[in-house]
Image: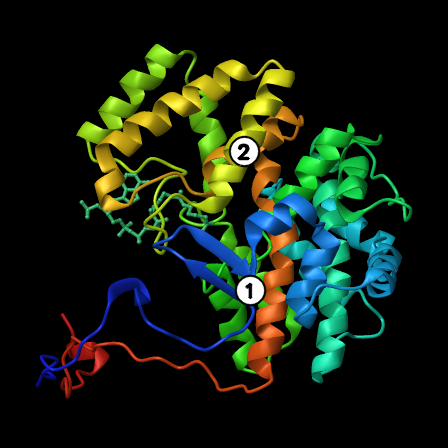
Amino acid sequence: MRYISNEEIQFTKGLEGVVSNSTQIGYVDGEAGKLYYRGYDVADLAEHSTYEETAYLLFYGKLPNQKELAAFSKKLASYRALPSDVLDRLVDMPCPCHPMSMLRTGVSLLECMDESCPIAEDLESKKEYGIRLIAQMATLTADIARHRENLPPIEPDPSLSHAANFLYMLNGKRGEPLAERVMDVALILHADHGMNASTFASMVVASTLSDLYSSVTAGIGSLKGPLHGGANERVIQMLKSLSSVEEAETFVERAISKKEKIMGFGHRVYKAYDPRAKIFQGYARELTELTGNDSLFAIARTIEKRVIEAYADKGILPNVDFYSGLIYHSLGIDGSIFTPIFAASRIAGWVARVIEYLEDNRLFRPRAIYQGPLDVPYVPIEERE
Ligand code: CMC
């Protein structure tokens, strides 16, 4: 037997710092705590824009003019309704599985139940399926949420914006203007974020020239994990498990002393305050006050202050998932639906980056350091111990 000498080989665990491709879609400036979509500061988009404009920007590289936006919004509205057999099959599954698993399965069903077999390889078709998925994933998410409450699905209202319609499909009635605006901001802020794990997963699948639906289901599967998009659900579980500021102080002290990870903090790229968390913190304060959830906000602030005190020098600060859940919770949305909302927004970034990569595709195919033996002599089964 022999072993390979790996002494010369350098690698970073988790591909930290590794550059996998070049892009014009978005940039995370981790040192400055800034996030850009196509060069626009996400804080400006959150203040002035809408999810439809943002998705258009990510897809087409420019903000739409009024005519372009009207056409794009009309197209999204026309794609929102789901084929009824997709939902019927989805809710008929024997396992009452997590909404992210239902969403992942729902996206697969959307492909397989479509008589037009949407597997065309050209980029224009993939872009069109991507736009359709932006529309349909919001509907799927709302329908899944209602199914969990034993409520029938609500037909989309084509006169409403993407965010307003999502809340309408979720609740069966229009949201308050502030709720609709906050949902729009939440969708804008989650739409893209550099080479995060789910985007990378989508791109790896796309680079094999597989179909777009497979890329998107890979993205959903990756986003589900608690180190990624699944953190928002864990955060609200943590906050709700604490009944007072004093309990929060004890909890955070204990977690720090035991070196336990606290959900909603830390980021591979940001070493400054996540700009999305900053925006969400403001809305979370406002909404929790309005809805009588201010004690949860006080608990969150207590945890944040202590974590920053203990870990800021290591760059461990609140990330996007720390305050987003307080917003959704204040809007009456169940914790299990937080990550599907993330996915229903991030679909724009996944597809935009997949299409961009496919314009000059090369199969992703990294290597691993092999530390096992070579030339192991084969032993017939009857001679094995
Ligand atoms: N609480 C306490 N310590 C932490 C945390 C945290 N949330 N995050 C990282 N650390 C510590 C970690 O224990 C380690 O310490 P040491 O060097 O002493 O062993 C050090 O920081 C590096 O941690 P890491 O996990 O190797 O760092 P990473 O770059 O892989 O971390 C992360 C990125 C997001 C996985 C991590 O910060 C984490 O697990 N956070 C909690 C989960 C979370 O909130 N995820 C959402 C991420 S942002 C939105 C998204 O991507 O979806």
Proximity of marks 1 and 2: CB atoms separated by less than 8 Å: no
What residue is pinned by disc 1?
Answer: 39
Looking at the rendering, which quadrant does residue 384 occupy?
A: bottom left
Quadrant location of the C terminus? bottom left
Mark 1 residue's CB less than 8 Å from ligand 1 = no
Looking at the rendering, which quadrant does residue 380 occupy?
A: bottom left
Q: Label 2's element? A: helix
Total tally of numbered discs in the picture:
2
Q: Nearer the viewer, mark 1 or mark 2?
A: 1
Q: Where is residue 288 drawn, in percent x and y?
A: 58, 21
Q: Where is residue 146 drawn, in percent x and y?
A: 74, 35
Q: Which mark is residue 221?
A: none
Q: Is residue 145 above or below residue 380?
A: above
Q: Which mark is residue 325?
A: 2
Q: Residue at x 76, y 51 (%)?
A: 89
Q: Residue at x 59, y 23 (%)?
A: 286
- Residues at marks 1 and 2, CA–CA distance in whole angstroms: 27 Å
Q: Residue at x 49, y 66 (%)?
A: 201
Which kind of residue does numbered mark 2 sit on? Gly
Between discs 1 and 2, the one toward the N terminus:
1
Decide which of 220, 312 is in the foreground and name it: 312
Q: Where is residue 215 drawn, in percent x and y?
A: 59, 69
Q: Where is residue 1 drawn, in percent x and y?
A: 8, 85
Looking at the rendering, which quadrant does residue 70 occupy?
A: bottom right
Q: Label 1's element? A: loop
Mark 2 residue's CB less than 8 Å from ligand 1 = no
Is 363 situated left or right of 247 in this image?
right
Q: Residue at x 40, y 82 (%)?
A: 365
Decide which of 135, 184 is in the foreground and name it: 184
Decide which of 350, 35 is in the foreground and name it: 35
